[in-house]
Image (cartoon, rainbow, N blue to C red):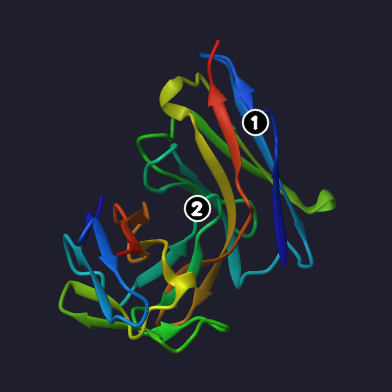
Amino acid sequence: DIQMTQSPSALSASVGDRVTITCRASQTIDKYLNWYQQRPGKAPKVLIYGAFSLQSGVPSRFTGAKSGTDFTLTISSLQPEDFATYYCQQSYNVPYTFGQGTKLDIK
Amino acid sequence: MLLQESGPGLVKPSETLSLTCFVSGGSLGSSSYYWAWIRQPPGEGLEWIGNLYHGGHTYYKPSLKSRVTMSVDTSKNQFSLNVTSVTAADTAVYYCARVSRLPSRGDVADSWGQGTLVTVSS
């Protein structure tokens, strides 16, 4: 199975901050990497697919990038509704696998 | 498109967990997407259980393959998950999801049910 390693596991930040979450794949996954946001008690919601593409309806402050097997999710200016847990997921090979998650909370 | 899981919230050890996902606002029979089950133990991360493709073909995560079955009932616009011989390790929120195939961008779970908690306990 392809291992997805996210960092950091937890992050404290303030409204208006710029934050970046990293996800590293254990092997090449081309650009088949998705990012999800999960609020407490809710289902995950896709933010970015194919490493770079913004899902319809998602604010433009969310951006995805790729460098080799390293992927990043950047939130340019945190809003109160962005405090949640974020997961990366590869769709290069089955079984699809997720990172362990990054919990973003208010400083 | 809306997805809604249903099924027992409590299952005894060694018995079978059975869940159904009802799909409204769309068809189960498109080749542009397929269906998946994903689970999340309380306080933990997400685990992809398997896929149900157009035509009824399936893929199951190898570590669960011997215990998992997925099927579709197009007449009722729903698909289902069975997990046999459950243990406490199968306690989780179970999500059904639609997975869209996006040319040159991969597959993405772009529509999810709200999830249903299944607890395995005697």
Residue type of the residue flagged with mark 2:
Pro
Q: Residue furthest top?
A: B122
Judge the density around disc 1: few (<14), some (14-19), many (≥20) Cα neighbours within 10 Å: some
Residue type of the residue flagged with mark 1:
Ser
Residue at screen point 58% across, 36% down: B117
What is the chain letter for disc 2? A
Dot 1 falls on a residue whose secondary structure is strand
| In the rendered image, residues at marks 1 and 2 fall on the same chain | no
Give the residue at mark 1: B18
Question: What count of labels does the image hold?
Answer: 2
What is the chain letter for disc 1? B
Indicate the quadrant where residue B82 lies. Answer: top right
Give the residue at mark 2: A40
Measure the alpha-carbon separation of dots 1 and 2: 25 Å
Above or below, comparing residue B75 to residue B33 in the picture: above
Above or below, comparing residue A37 to residue B5 in the picture: below
Residue B87, image x, y percentages:
45, 19
Residue A69, image x, y percentages:
17, 72
Can residue B96 be seen in the rendering of this structure?
yes
Residue at screen point 56% across, 54% down: A42
